[in-house]
Amino acid sequence: VRICHEFRWAVKHLQSLKSAYARAPYLDDHLPFIETTYRTGFEKLIEFNMAFIRYLFRQLKIETEIKLLSELGIQSAGNQMLVEICRRLGASVYLAQRAATKYLDRERFQREGIAVQLIKPPACIYPQLWGAFVSNLSTCDLLFNCGPESSDVISRANERLC
């Protein structure tokens, strides 16, 4: 998907972030990266997204290797694509959120020797700027509010998952 650079969307989005998180204790720690990324003028959305994803991985101390579907050379779609991804990466278990169960052909996975494990990730509860905790906001909300403690917040939530 190509990014349309008309209508100053990047400037507007950046101003919205600054306004919404002006009082967040760690906004200034991440603002230089965000401003630079918005000014870079990426041509494709994947390039813009991957810049943010890699930054978030570094900030959260996530060392998981990122593989793009385009790197795997898989042409199928739907459940078959998921099975082929698992096979290509040597996975014997496919993790999916419980809500995805209605879309999964579990028998297809089973025929291929791949177990489907349904999970419900716990909410990462952390201090936010306003009122009662609101779950499932962006990772930026976590970083802007918790800074270097963000990876610990995620680790504690993951311990509850296991």
Image: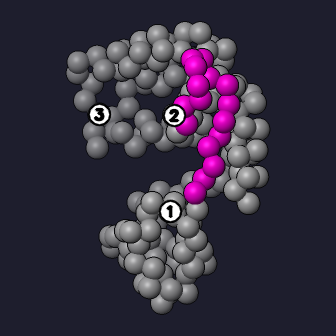
Residue 17, position as x, y percentages in the image: 46, 18
- State the quadrant of the N terminus: top left
* Front residue of this view, candidates 84 and 19: 19
Q: Quadrant location of residue 128? A: top right
Instruction: Determine which residue is flagged by label 2.
Output: 137
Spatial separation of the CA atoms under disc 1 and disc 3: 33 Å
Whichever of callouts 1 and 3 sits on the residue coming sooner in the sequence is: 3
Residue 44, position as x, y percentages in the image: 34, 39
Task: Look at the magenta stretch and give its main secondary structure.
Answer: loop
Q: Nearer the viewer, mark 1 or mark 3?
A: 1
Compared across the picture, whether 147 is left or right of 8 comes to right
119 in relation to 86, above or below = above
Instruction: Determine which residue is flagged by label 3.
Output: 3
Task: Assess whether residue 4 is covered by the magenta stretch.
Answer: no
Whichever of callouts 2 and 3 sits on the residue coming sooner in the sequence is: 3
Say if mark 2 contacts mark 3, CB within 8 Å. Answer: no
Spatial separation of the CA atoms under disc 2 and disc 3: 24 Å
122 in relation to 21, above or below = below
* Residue 98 numbered tag: 1
